[in-house]
Image (spheres, helix red, strand yellow):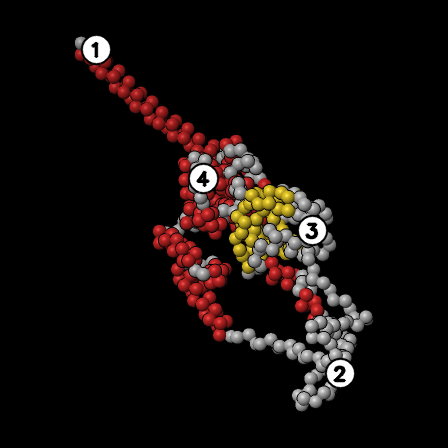
Amino acid sequence: MDEVIARLTEISMRQQQITEHLATRQGQTEQELNELRTAAARHVPLPDPRMKVTQLLPKLTADDDVESFLQMFENTATQEGWDPGDWARLVAPLLTGEAQRAYFMLPTERVDDYKELKREILARLGLSPVCAAQYFHDWEYKPRLPARAQAAELSRLAQHWLLEGDPTAALVTERVVVDRFLRALPRSPRQAVGMRNPSTITELVEAVELAEAVQHQGAGERAPPFPRRVIQERRRPEGNPRSEGRPGPPSQRDESMPTADPTPAPTTWLAGCILHQDLPKGAPRVDVEVDGRPFAALLDTGSAVSLIQSHILSPRRLTKATIPVTCVHGDTRHVPTRRVTISAGLDSWPMDVGLVKDLPVPVLIGRDWPGLDRLLAANVPFASPRRAHLQRRPGKRTRHRPVLLASDSGRDESSE
């Protein structure tokens, strides 16, 4: 009996040793497998996010809302865990049209910054902070549209205006105060202060003080009096009495010499209709900005309203308002309008322009733009009849005519 017990005890101890050996060997095997997996993962490249982004997101189309498309991309990039530093490189293959041109127009040092890219794209589509503020104040409730959609649109405009650049609460308050202060200023100082684009209350106050100082300085300076032209009465010759009841012949007027250069008439550019004829040679063109986007504009003194090609503006903010446009051929069109800001040099004014699809130039500036006269004076020679009259050929002498002066002594005499 004792031998059986001893034999069972020995067998139990050997089984326990074998179990411990197997457990140790299993742990070593698992450790070796983990090391092999880690080593293999180092040599296997990670999947390129650019291949994945084309599978998850479609390309931008002309019918898509650019802002909503960018928001969808940001949500997808956050969920997939893509590096924010690669967002600009990842979204580039999905862009088309004006958004794609904005990407290629960015400088090399800013092309990898997604925030700069997004700001440039939205600015080209008329959603810069300045334009967003203007749209926010021009917003009107439309009874025929859903209230939820209108509230979302108004909220989006407010975010573009007030939350640009992740500002603090104090900076948001300053933006509201600056905007309200600017809109309360009179027109002349408002234009001067608005050109400095103040973003804080301190900059606003400095700009207002500078504008007031310049205005007071200009008010103290009186323009020199213009020399008055003396018109002398001609003496009536004797022996030729004239009835008091009948008017006399018109007085003599100086006439130009036959060899003198003819005085050029004031130029009226495009007084006809550019929709029915080719553009005249030498028509003045200037570089302007429409909502921050550069274009070549044509100056037209024969047009009472400014016109813009409809396809260069985003269709997302078109209004139902129209204006009649009549050309010299009797053709009348009712074209839609759009509120834009046209800038040229230091002049910048928001205004309503007509949208014409088949306009042969991108922008046509008419007489309703307040800075047209200054642009003509700077770009068109002899745009003013006074300037044209003052241009004389050197070497020509003006012909002098004798003028009869009335004698102060009461004697019937004449002098030259």
Q: What's the residue type where badge 4 is placed?
A: Lys
Q: Can residue 15 be seen by looking at this rendering?
A: yes
Q: What's the residue type where badge 3 is placed?
A: Gly
Tag 4 secondary structure: loop
**134 horizontally vs 97: left or right:** left
Residue 108 image position (x, y, % from top left)? 56, 50
To which quarter of the image does residue 333 belong?
top right
**Circle nearer the N terminus (3, 4):** 4
Residue 166 image position (x, y, % from top left)? 41, 49
Residue under the point 60% across and 75% down: 226
Compared with 371, 9 (above or below) is above
> Which mark lies nearer to you, 1 or 4?
4
**Residue occupied by mark 3:** 272
**Circle nearer the N terminus (1, 4):** 1
Residue 111 image position (x, y, % from top left)? 54, 48
Q: What's the residue type where badge 1 is placed?
A: Val
Compared with 330, 203 (above or below) is below
Q: Can residue 108 be seen by looking at this rendering?
A: no
- Few, some or many C-alpha atoms within 10 Å of disc 3 (few <14, some 14-19, many ≥20)? some
**Residue occupied by mark 1:** 4
Tag 2 secondary structure: loop
